[in-house]
């Protein structure tokens, strides 16, 4: 029994011409905000408020960072700014009678056992077989 697998599930549908529903909502919302600011404030004050609103509207509509929409990064930055941050101070331990801390003392190097080539081949073969059995 065969099933059809949906293709291109990560691409949004274009509902309003070349725009998706989200893009259209950002454009309409930004345009509405610009209109309200233009009507409520004097021209010079309105221009100072309209420019950032227009830039934010264009960024939300079209700008992508690493293939993700700008809204994800905007949300993450707002959450980071609003959250309380926990800073932990790590106290350096000082040995009594010396001026050096415990952190300054060199640590001993651990010895890593060597694996023979035949053992590596056995492990590789086991991984290949286990991987094929899972499929």
Image (cartoon, rainbow, N blue to C red):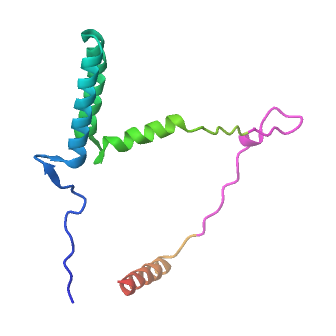
Residue drawn 39% across the image and 81% down it: 131
Residue furthest to the right in view is 97
- Residue 105's image quarter? top right
Residue 63 makes an appearance in the image: no
Picture mark count: 0
Quarter containing the N terminus: bottom left
User: For this rendering, which residue is in front, 78 or 103?
Assistant: 78
User: For this rendering, which residue is in front, 100 or 24?
Assistant: 24
- 36 horizontally vs 79: left or right: left
Range shown magenta: 91-113
Image location of residue 16, percent across then percent down = 13, 47
Image location of residue 73, percent across then percent down = 38, 41
Residue furthest to the bottom in view is 1
- Residue 78's image quarter? top left
The question of residue 87 being in magenta is answered with no
- 118 horizontally vs 37: left or right: right
Figure check: 27 above or below 110: above
Residue furthest to the front in view is 40
Residue drawn 26% across the image and 15% down it: 47
Residue drawn 75% across the image and 38% down it: 91
Prevailing secondary structure class for the magenta stretch in the rendered image: loop
């Amino acid at each position: 029994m065969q099933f059809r697998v949906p293709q291109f599930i990560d691409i949004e549908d274009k509902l309003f011409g070349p725009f998706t529903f989200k893009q259209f909502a950002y454009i309409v919302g930004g345009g509405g905000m610009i209109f309200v600011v233009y009507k409520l404030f004097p021209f010079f004050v309105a221009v100072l408020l309209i420019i950032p609103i227009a830039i934010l509207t264009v960024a939300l509509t079209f700008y992508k960072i690493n293939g993700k929409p700008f809204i994800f990064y905007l949300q993450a930055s707002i959450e980071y700014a609003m959250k309380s941050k926990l800073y932990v101070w790590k106290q350096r331990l000082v040995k009594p009678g010396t001026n050096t801390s415990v952190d300054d003392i060199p640590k001993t190097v651990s010895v890593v056992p060597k694996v023979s080539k035949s053992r590596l081949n056995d492990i590789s073969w086991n991984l290949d077989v286990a991987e094929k059995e899972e499929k």
